[in-house]
């Protein structure tokens, strides 16, 4: 074991092995970045908690190669059955939509958080990495070249030296507090008990809710992959949070009025308060915070876990680029892009919470699916067309069905998949650019229109690309590694891509 005089070294130290830390680790692993992932808990998290994956997160998981396993374990949300005396109102938690070539994932996936994280750990293990449980960050100091961290391990205190430290350590983040980052917002007096337990004699084809039950709201949601339900029971102001088996069973029986239920001991139980807080900063020098360490929120709307995943996805490629020689200013764009997204997410979640409190319909609209989140105002975004269309630089990169001369029909997402930038030249030759900038690959593809005779890498035979991106002949589209449109340029500006890559990835192409 290393000691204070001979510290271990790594490029990135990730603190916290929840969903955000695991996604960041998976992204860094495929980029060849050296990291350690530590978690103070002695064992993996065992509860359902964040159980909804929104369509944008599903696109991220597809890129990371884990979506198939998640879909095999999860289900779409069941209909909501709301009970009021003898009346039952049936509704859907999300608006029904059909997939399109531009948006292949439009139905949220329900999966308990413990299972999502278990799948992420399995893929990380396949990549040759694993979280270190029972390892707690107890202190750190940074200088111009890196961070020296103290880790409390099962065998004593260990020193480690890292180029960057990332705090993915939850709402009570040690990293955030150690950086003295303020965490303004509001904490309401509302609290609730949440628990996972088996319930016999209760149909599993609905999310059962008693919004007007005496004593407070009760919800019983069937969890996929087993025979358990997630119970959520609101507590009255000042009510003691009794997490005993007996009290949880009593809450269910009293508020549901269903004497025939057979209730089993909870497998996991917790109490949570309803708060909405946003960190004042996401970065101090070489230390960053992400996920719940940067923002906490009501669970309404299914936004928090997904926002945390996308924080990590935004930060991962930027860390790798800077470690390969890109300018440090690239890392400043993480906070600039993600903090406004979190602020909007908090407002959305609080809106859903208010609707629930007022017993109004709480159906989640398109705004909950996170497909329209954009970085149009980011310094990383360049919209250079004289006449932009509906989709602009800074928006999420839509999918499209294209034709490959060798492989037949391919999806644009298959082209974008991986840790590279992608340059699409529509009905024109691609400009001459370096295909690597400081270790970052640039995939260059020419795309011809449906009626063009010229040979190209891909053919837009159904005009999916043209329609989704609003393209004209000769225009260029540069897509970031996190599948956002970095730049769209007219044909007359072939040097725009090279200037962009040189500015943000460095000057050493090869």
Image (cartoon, rainbow, N blue to C red):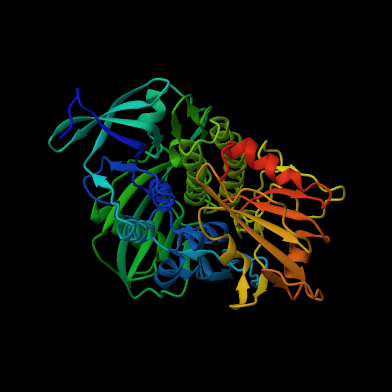
Q: Residue 347, image x and y in percent? A: 61, 42
Q: Quadrant of the N terminus?
A: top left
Residue 74 vertical position relative to residue 312 in the rendered view, above or below: below
Closer-to-camera residue (132/195):
132
Taking the view exactly as shown, the residue that stands out farthest to the right is 387
What residue is rendered at 17% in x and 27% in y? 3
Q: Residue 54, image x and y in percent? A: 54, 59
What residue is rendered at 73% in x and 59% in y? 425
Lateral position of residue 383 relative to residue 158, left or right: right
Taking the view exactly as shown, the residue that stands out farthest to the left is 155
Q: Residue 47, image x and y in percent? A: 33, 55
Closer-to-camera residue (378/83):
378
Residue 365 vertical position relative to residue 104 in the rendered view, above or below: above
Lateral position of residue 425 relative to residue 340, left or right: right
Q: Residue 298, image x and y in percent? A: 50, 45
Q: Does residue 100 appear in this view?
A: no
Closer-to-camera residue (55/347):
55
Residue 170 vertical position relative to residue 225 in the rendered view, above or below: above
Residue 472 vertical position relative to residue 97 in the rendered view, above or below: above
Q: Does residue 229 appear in this view?
A: yes
**Count of number-bearing discs:** 0
- Corner quadrant of residue 400: bottom right
């Amino acid at each position: 074991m290393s000691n204070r005089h001979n510290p271990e070294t790594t490029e990135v130290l990730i603190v916290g092995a929840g969903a955000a830390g695991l996604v960041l680790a998976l992204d860094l692993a495929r980029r060849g970045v050296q990291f350690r992932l530590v978690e103070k808990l002695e064992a993996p998290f065992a509860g359902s908690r964040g159980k909804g994956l929104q369509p944008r997160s599903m696109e991220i998981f597809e890129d990371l190669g884990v979506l198939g396993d998640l879909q095999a374990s999860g289900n779409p949300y069941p209909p909501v059955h709301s009970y009021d005396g003898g009346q039952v109102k049936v509704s859907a938690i999300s608006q029904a939509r059909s997939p399109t070539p531009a948006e292949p994932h439009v139905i949220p996936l329900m999966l308990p958080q413990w299972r999502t994280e278990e799948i992420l750990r399995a893929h990380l293990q396949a990549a040759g990495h694993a979280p270190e449980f029972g390892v707690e960050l107890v202190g750190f100091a940074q200088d111009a070249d890196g961070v020296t961290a103290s880790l409390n391990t099962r065998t004593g205190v260990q020193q480690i030296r890292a180029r960057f430290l990332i705090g993915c350590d939850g709402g009570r983040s040690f990293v955030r507090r150690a950086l003295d980052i303020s965490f303004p917002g509001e904490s309401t007096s509302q609290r609730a008990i949440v628990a996972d337990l088996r319930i016999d004699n209760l149909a599993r084809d609905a999310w059962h809710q008693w919004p007007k039950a005496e004593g407070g709201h009760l919800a019983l949601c069937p969890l996929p992959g087993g025979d358990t339900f997630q119970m959520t029971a609101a507590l009255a102001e000042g009510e003691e949070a009794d997490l005993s088996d007996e009290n949880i069973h009593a809450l269910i029986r009293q508020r549901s009025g269903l004497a025939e239920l057979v209730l089993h001991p909870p497998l996991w139980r917790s109490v949570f308060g309803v708060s909405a807080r946003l960190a004042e900063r996401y970065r101090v020098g070489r230390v960053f915070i992400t996920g719940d360490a940067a923002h906490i929120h009501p669970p309404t709307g299914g936004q928090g876990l997904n926002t945390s995943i996308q924080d990590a996805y935004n930060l991962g490629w930027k860390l790798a680029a800077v470690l390969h020689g890109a300018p440090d200013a690239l890392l400043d764009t993480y906070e600039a892009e993600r903090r406004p997204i979190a602020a909007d997410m908090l407002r959305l979640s609080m809106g859903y919470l208010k609707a629930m409190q007022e017993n109004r319909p709480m159906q989640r609209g398109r705004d909950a699916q996170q497909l329209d989140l954009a970085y149009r105002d980011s310094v990383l975004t360049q919209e250079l067309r004289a006449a932009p269309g509906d989709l602009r630089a800074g928006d999420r990169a839509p999918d499209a069905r294209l034709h490959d001369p060798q492989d037949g029909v391919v999806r644009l997402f298959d082209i974008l998949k991986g840790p590279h930038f992608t340059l699409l030249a529509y009905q024109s030759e691609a400009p001459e650019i370096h295909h690597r900038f400081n270790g970052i690959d640039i995939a260059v593809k020419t795309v011809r229109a449906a009626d063009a005779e010229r040979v190209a890498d891909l053919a837009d035979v159904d005009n999916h690309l043209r329609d989704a991106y609003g393209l004209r002949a000769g225009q260029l589209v540069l897509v970031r590694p996190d599948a956002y449109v970095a730049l769209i340029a007219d044909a007359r500006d072939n040097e725009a891509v090279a200037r962009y890559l040189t500015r943000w990835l460095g000057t050493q192409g090869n």
